[in-house]
Structures are given as structure tokens and as C-alpha cells.
Amino acid sequence: MATGRTHRPATRSRGIPEATVARLPLYLRALTALSERSVPTVSSEELATAAGVNSAKLRKDFSYLGSYGTRGVGYDVEYLVYQISRELGLTQDWPVVIVGIGNLGAALANYGGFASRGFRVAALIDADPAMAGKPVAGLPVRHTDELESIITDNGVSIGVIATPAGAAQQVCDRLVAAGVTSILNFAPTVLSVPEGVDVRKVDLSIELQILAFHEQRKAGEETTSAQEPAAAAQPRSGAAVRTPATGRAAGKGPDGDVPAVMPA
């Protein structure tokens, strides 16, 4: 069986832009849903809508894969699933280790989507001796003392860090020294890695803060919109107000200096 140590995706050598690579999983998710519904073909517009991108960008992305669809027919769903899976390296087995089996690590271990997407959780690792041997998601938790041997024995090239922030860099250094070249980091800290090691960071608090920014902006826009009708009902600063009796401006006289209406 192929492992992640000996087979790597060819996206870089083929010159596929990183932005396109980042969108390929979106296309694959949408295509997989269509495949499960036995939909044979899909237009670029339909697939772009399902993936949340515009159709022109989708067609450009697929041109890097050498897939152009058929005019009037669209794209073959099953072939695109295979093509994108192959490009992402998902047609082979990728053994993964998860380090840090707290609440988040355990939730990741129980995620059922790994196997169907080309990933196999090879080991669960934690520094707490009390966790050693406890089953999580059908696997016994291993102690961090075994980390290097686990990586070597299973040919692991992808590591997932779900430790507290203070322990993440040390775990990262050990993973890299043992041969891991790709890391998915859930710890709320920035990792320092040597050239040739890829890190993807997932920080839920940052994503929530970004959403809070957008909510605050929307609330400000709603407040502004609510104030506009009231402001429109008030006379503009310096605007003349006509009196029923004279039709002249109440604010200024004919010369603009004295009131046009004087008290009796």
C-alpha cells in the first residue's frame, strides 16, 4: 500500500497556483455530493454555485487540470471526482498522527470523514501518562515517548497538533525531526518550521473574531439606515424655511442678514 512518505501530489511541479489548490477541496466536496445523488454531469455554473465560487474562476481552475468539459453537456462528475482526488493525492493512503487527545483531539479522532477522503489515523498521542492505553475512536492512546517510533513505523508525513499553545512548538519540532513534512495546527499559536515543511493553521477563535467584525459592521449599517429617514425629515443646515404668510425665508431677510419676520 502506498504511503504518504513515498508519494506526494504533483501540483507544484505542474505549476498549479496555490489559490487553485485551496479551491480544489471545495469542488471535490460539491462533486462528491452530486456523485452520491447519482448525478452524471454538471455545468460549470451549477458546480460553481455549489462550491461558492464564480463559474469563470472554476473554468480557469479546471484548465490547470486539463479538464475543459463538453459544450452543452458540462463536466463528467465521476471523472472530475477522480481527477481532483488524484491531484490532491487522495487516491492513496495517507497515515496521520494526532498529538494532543483532549476534547478537540478526541473530536478529531472521532471524525468519520478521514477514511473516505484518503486519510488513515495511524495513532493518537498524548503527553499525559494517565491517557496511555485508553481507547479513543477505537484506537489506544499512545504516550509521546513513542512519537518518533510511531512516525517511522507507519511512514507518517502528516501530523495534526491539537495540544495547548505552550506545548505546540516542542511537538512540532519533534514531528519535523522525525520526518513529518506537513502539519495541521489547531493550537492557538504560530509555529516555526524549516523550509520544506508545510503548515496549515486552524484557529477557531480567529474565525469567530472575523465573524464578530462583520456582525458589528452590519449592525452599524442598520443603525445608519434607521437614522437616515429621520435625518431626511429635518431641514438641512442653512436651508431656508418659508412662512405661510409671506413665502419668504424665515431664517434670513431679503439681504440675508436680518430676519424677514420680526416680532410685533
Image: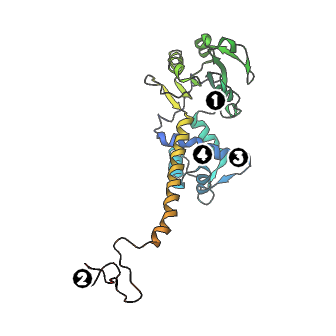
Question: How many residues crowd mark 2 within 10 Å: few (<14), some (14–19), many (20+)?
Answer: few
Question: How many residues crowd mark 3 within 10 Å: few (<14), some (14–19), many (20+)?
Answer: some
Q: Which residue is mark 2?
A: 255
Q: Which residue is mark 1?
A: 92
Q: Which residue is mark 3?
A: 35
Kindly state the secondary structure of the residue where label 2 is placed.
Answer: loop
Q: Residue at x 65, y 23 (%)?
A: 102
Residues under labels 1 and 4: Cα distance? 19 Å
Q: Closer to us: mark 3 or mark 4?
A: 4
Kindly state the secondary structure of the residue where label 1 is placed.
Answer: loop
Residues under labels 2 and 3: Cα distance? 80 Å
**Residue 41 location (% of width, % of height):** 67, 53
For residue 27, which numbered disc appears in the image?
A: 4
Circle nearer the N terminus (2, 3):
3
Q: Nearer the viewer, residue 42 or 110?
A: 110
Residue 16 in sight from this viewpoint: no
Q: Residue at x 47, y 27 (%)?
A: 190
**Residue 119 location (% of width, % of height):** 65, 29
Residues under labels 3 and 4: Cα distance? 12 Å
Q: Is residue 39 above or below residue 242?
A: above
Question: How many residues crowd mark 1 within 10 Å: few (<14), some (14–19), many (20+)?
Answer: some
**Residue 212 location (% of width, % of height):** 54, 45
Quadrant where the image shows the C terminus: bottom left
Circle nearer the N terminus (1, 3):
3
Circle nearer the N terminus (1, 4):
4
Amino acid at circle 1: Gln
Question: How many residues crowd mark 4 within 10 Å: few (<14), some (14–19), many (20+)?
Answer: many
Amino acid at circle 3: Ser
